[in-house]
Amino acid sequence: MGGTGSPKKLKTGFHSRILLIIPENYAHSRLSLFIMNRDLYLKIFHKQQLIDAVPPNEQIAGWALKVIAMLFPELSDKSYATAADIEEEALRLRHELTIMMNATKACMDCDNAAISIKFFNQLPEIYRVLQTDIDAILEGDPAAKCEFEVIRAYPGFFALSFYRIAHELLMLNVPMLPRILTEYAHARTGIDIHPGARIGEYLQIDHGTGIVIGETTEIGDHVKIYQGVTLGALSVEKAMADIKRHPTIEDHVILYSNATILGGETVIGHHSVIGGNVWLTHSVAPGSLVFHDPDVTVLEGKTLNQ
């Protein structure tokens, strides 16, 4: 049988026999495949030489998870015997952050040890603000039974925890790591918060899936955001990278599901309510009620009394 090769019998651990046929031109086929794809392989190889060194995303996210678990023992599998043990854990995590930044090529010219110290000096404030987010969820969501449940189960808190850490790193001019952290939370929760956004205290994210908060968004205190809300840009031209492209949401605003608010000059005044499915590209005054009228008609009992 031309070209089919010679049958070979292999024994398995179950004493059965497998018939393996190896084509006689197998080695030639592999060589032909390599020659056909040589340009692609060379392109990948040359690109690999140019890639900036960055620790794996899992390592970076794992560090943040350990920081959050240290701050909130509800998420930790450790039990600290004394406060000194927690301080020791913080020192280990600070050292781990320095090692990650040292391993990041974009951080090679930075004083990474000093940056790590500055970040961990901000931990009390990060913890305080995250506690306000927990309080906002507890006060605003009738389904939230206790703080433990919010910390352990709510995707909004998970996304905000990563955002608060990433934002602080960004404010310290740490490259790469902040975006990797918020994209990890995005993948886990469906909530996309750019680390450059400026978000106040007591933010309640309800459900959360599909929320997008752009880089230059500004959000005040006591804001409530439902699933599917987009705080985006009117244009995505690269030339606009250094200007404000996303809206400002003032204090005590409620944004209901699937509302879309676009533009760097768009301001939603304090104590406003933006209804579901609203599309806004202009500012609204404080205390406004904005809603989309879908013109839905309900005829009660129609199917029962023809």
Image (cartoon, rainbow, N blue to C red):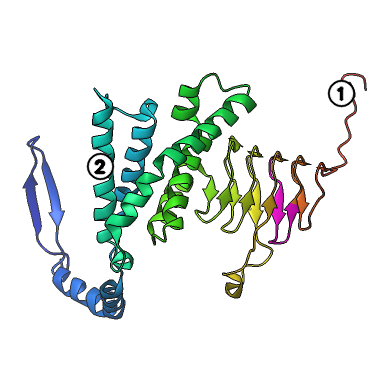
Q: Given the current orientation, which residue lies at the most extreme right position? A: 306
Which residue occupies 76% across, 58% down? 281
The percent coordinates of residue 34 (x first, y second) are 23, 75
Which residue occupies 76% across, 52% down? 279
Left or right for 104, reference 21 = right
Can residue 185 be seen in this snapshot?
A: no
Answer few, some or many: residues within 10 Å of disc 1's Cα (few below 14, many 20 plus, some between 14 and 19): few
The percent coordinates of residue 298 (x first, y second) are 88, 30
Give the foreground label among 1 and 2: 2
What segment is highlighted magenta in the picture?
Answer: 256-267
Task: State the CA–CA distance, disc 1 to disc 2.
Answer: 68 Å
Nearer-N-terminus badge (1/2): 2
Identify residue type, mark 2.
Leu
User: Which SS does the magenta portion mostly show?
Assistant: loop
Q: Secondary structure at mark 2?
A: helix
The percent coordinates of residue 293 (x first, y second) are 85, 43
The percent coordinates of residue 75 (x first, y second) are 37, 29
Q: What residue would you read off at disc 1?
A: 303
Answer few, some or many: residues within 10 Å of disc 2's Cα (few below 14, many 20 plus, some between 14 and 19): some
Identify residue type, mark 1.
Thr
Q: Secondary structure at mark 1?
A: loop
Quadrant in which residue 282 is drawn? bottom right
Left or right for 170, reference 205 = left
Can you say whether 250 is above or below 171 in the image?
above
Q: Which mark is residue 279?
A: none
Can residue 108 be seen in this snapshot?
A: yes
Q: What residue would you read off at disc 2?
A: 91
Can you say whether 226 is above or below 215 in the image?
above
